Structure formats: structure tokens, C-alpha cells
Amino acid sequence: MALTAGMAAKVKKWENGIDPMVTMMTEDDIKEYLETKLWEYNTNNIKDYTLWEAFQDNFSLFNTIEAWEKIQKRDCRRLRAYLYYGGVYVEENTRHITTAQMLLKVVQEETRYPWDDNEIVEDGQIRDDLIIGPITSINIFLEGY
């Protein structure tokens, strides 16, 4: 993807991060920040450990559930999916645990969660949620299933 003047301005604007709890940050600011970071991850082909590290750096100030709840639910789900298919393990939400809570958990990880076969294979087949893809991680191997 080409770096347009508009995107270059957004990358520059958000290069030092964002504090979602600052009262002057609007919902639009937070959405623009998230969109810009997803664009950077995708454009720079960031995945696996590097994606986990970049996510932790970029979202370190999203260190409370209140901060994550400032992001619309659908955008949290998009971010979760991008991380997941990029090789960053993010648990699925349940009726009692939100996607925002799962993203907060990843931000707070001291070390990157190591994927194991149970997170890739279920009943001898690739998990349905991984088949949806696209998988960008080089560490998630689907061959042989």
C-alpha cells in the first residue's frame, strides 16, 4: 500500500502513541489511532513476535478495562482478529469475558504466549476460526491437517 499524504500525516500524528484516558481524546481520535496502527502493521508485514512487541508498545497505555472500552466492540474484534491471524495468541471472548478484556490481557503479558497444537488443531482438524484467516503468521503451520 502506498503512503498517501493523509496516511503520512496520521502516522506522524500518532508516532508517539496515545493515552486513551486523557479527557481531550475523542472516540474518533482513538479509532484513527487504531486504524493507523493496523495500517502500519499490515504495510510493514509485522507478525508473530514483532507484532506482539509492537502491539504492547503501541497499546501500553490501554492498561485498564476502562481504556479498552473506549474502543468500539467491532474495532476490538478487528484488532483481535488481526493479532490472532498474525501469530499473537488472543483468547476468544465468552459470554462473561469481553474481547476488550482479552486484549488487555495481551497488553499485560510479561512474555508472549506460546501457541501449542491445541490452539491450532481441534478434533484432528484445523480449528474453524483459523481456516477463516488469512493467516499471516509464519509460526502457525497448517500443513498436514
Image (tube, rainbow, N blue to C red):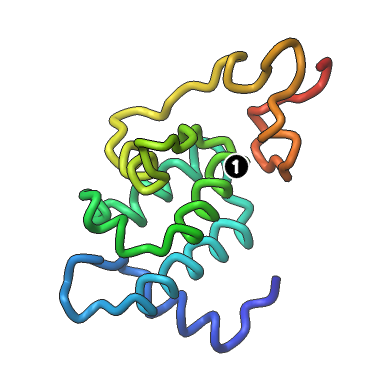
Residue 93 versus residue 107: which sits nearer the camera?
93
Can you say whether 31 is above or below 113 in the image? below
Viewport quadrant of the C terminus: top right
Residue 20, quarter of the rendered image: bottom left
Whether residue 12 is situated above or below residue 112 in the rendered picture: below
x 35%, y 36%: residue: 96
> Which of the image's four quarters has the N terminus?
bottom right
> Image point 69% across, 76% down: which residue?
2
Q: Foreground: 6 or 65?
A: 65
Residue ranking furthest to the bottom: 5
User: x%, y% of residue 66?
Assistant: 22, 56
Spot occupied by residue 48 in the image (x, y as percentages of width and height) = 55, 37
Q: Is residue 127 rendered to the left or right of residue 84?
A: right
Would you say 76 lies left or right of 21 here?
right
Horizontally, is 99 left or right of 40 in the view?
A: left
Residue 101 % position (x, y) = 33, 42
Count of numbered circles on the image: 1
Q: Residue 26 sits in which quadrant? A: bottom left
- Residue on which disc 1 sits: 86
Outermost residue on the front side: it is: 95
Residue at left offset 32%, top offset 37%: 105
Q: Position of residue 71 (x, y in %)?
A: 37, 63
Find numbered disc 1 in the image and state the secondary structure of the residue it sits on.
Answer: loop
Residue density around tag 1, few if under 14, some if 14–19, many if 20 or more, within 10 Å = many
Image point 42% across, 49% down: which residue? 54
**Residue at the far right in the pictured view:** 144
Work out whether 22 lies above or below 138. below
What amino acid does circle 1 point to? Answer: Gly
Q: Nearer the viewer, residue 41 or 135?
A: 135
